[in-house]
Image (cartoon, rainbow, N blue to C red):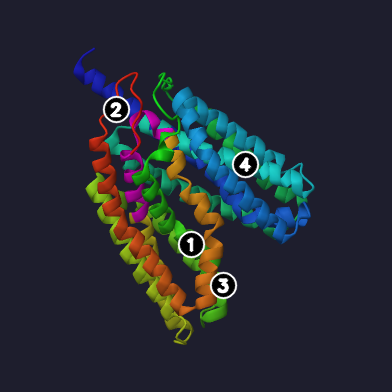
Amino acid sequence: MTKTRRAARTAHTSARTHRVLLAAQLGNSVGDGAFYVTSALYFSRVVGLSAAQIGAGLAVAWGIGSIAGVPLGHLADRRGPRRSAVLLALATSVAVASFLLIRSFVPFLLAAAVYATAQSGLAAARQALLAGLVEPGARVGTLARLQATLNAGLAVGAALGGLALSSGTRTAYFAVFALDALGFLVCALLLRGLPALPGTPAVPGEGPRLVVLRDRPYAVLTLLNALLLLRLPLLSLVLPLWIVGRTAAPGWTASALFVLNTGAVMLFQVRAARSVTGLPEATRVVGRSGLLMLASCAVFALTAAGLGPWPTVAFLVLGAVLQVVAEMWHSAGSWQIGLALAPADRIGQYQGFYGTGVPVARTLGPLLVTTLLIGWGVAGWLVLGGIFLAAGLATGPAVRWAERARSRAAAPVAGEPVKAY
């Protein structure tokens, strides 16, 4: 086979891989969008759980899921990421379907724990699969397209969930959960069509299996990433409460800001990621994202100044624009950092650990952020902005620390123990 034919065949395989990854992302994100907007009311009105039970159950479930992400990522490294991703997508589908059968708190807690565990493991396995199928220079661009596709799917799913909410019937809720379960089943079938990647067998005497837990620079980067992810509860939880309780803006502004955020990520995430081609660029955009989040928080704080409805709306839109630009920069930079600093044979467990920032931000973030912003008001916004700025600026030194640690720890040969960083 000539070089030209080989190159053409490689390009065709790469294009097909991208299409399958995007289709799999779209398949489960539509169902997830519908699930997110209806699940709380389903568990309350259909299952009969109290708000306290739902909140506590989900917090415990996501806590279990965040812990399980590392060993499941390690399993993906050992058994092969495609096989693991397919099995975990199937497990997620079964967990969602099981919600249709529960009628009390304990089964809800068990099903939610399986759901969160499978989701956390699936995220790590998919990252390892992408890293094995996509060239390093194209990974951030591919992840940006996946993020844009995710937002598009969530938007479509949220619209479908809205129809179920307007109906309010048990059948409508059941249809939403069935759609989400079907979406993960489709995701599993699509991922199964990708090329199989071999796992990395264990080497006798190689040292601790979960070496990421001893990698101090990577742990610091994971913590900083989790702090930057405290932006997650802002649009969905805090801003609606802030707008209604502290500003003169109409209540529908919160919904408009959510649509603005989702649409901007769909349209511009790929463009925002183009400049991130290595760790230096990644650290710069993460630092800028922290600075921009500080500016966004300051603008949101101004909306409590009694400016009148329409000037307040204008400031809220400005704050939301600054936030979504910061979000896109942070996403692109964090993808590059999380993948580039993970050893090639341990991407699953490293991504499982790095990905704990999302469930931590979603479980602990609402309590922290609402305490700061709703309890402290304007001062809380400035404190939160300072946290974002500090985390963004600290990312650069932490990345350089991780690079120095890796340069000192030479790659071990077979039979040598893996060195902790």
Viewer-closest of 402 and 109:
402
Mark nearer the N terminus (1 vs 4): 4
Task: Report the Cα–Cα distance between label 4 and label 2.
Answer: 36 Å
Q: Secondary structure at mark 4?
A: helix
Mark nearer the N terminus (4 vs 3): 4
Q: Nearer the viewer, mark 2 or mark 3?
A: 3
Label 4: which residue? 115
Which amino acid, mark 2? Ala
Q: Residue at x 60, y 37 (%)?
A: 92
Task: Report the Cα–Cα distance between label 1 and label 3.
Answer: 17 Å
Which amino acid, mark 4? Tyr
Label 3: which residue? 241
Q: Residue at x 45, y 85 (%)?
A: 305
Task: Report the Cα–Cα distance between label 1 and label 4.
Answer: 27 Å
Residue 96 location, quadrant? top right
Viewer-closest of 13 and 240:
240
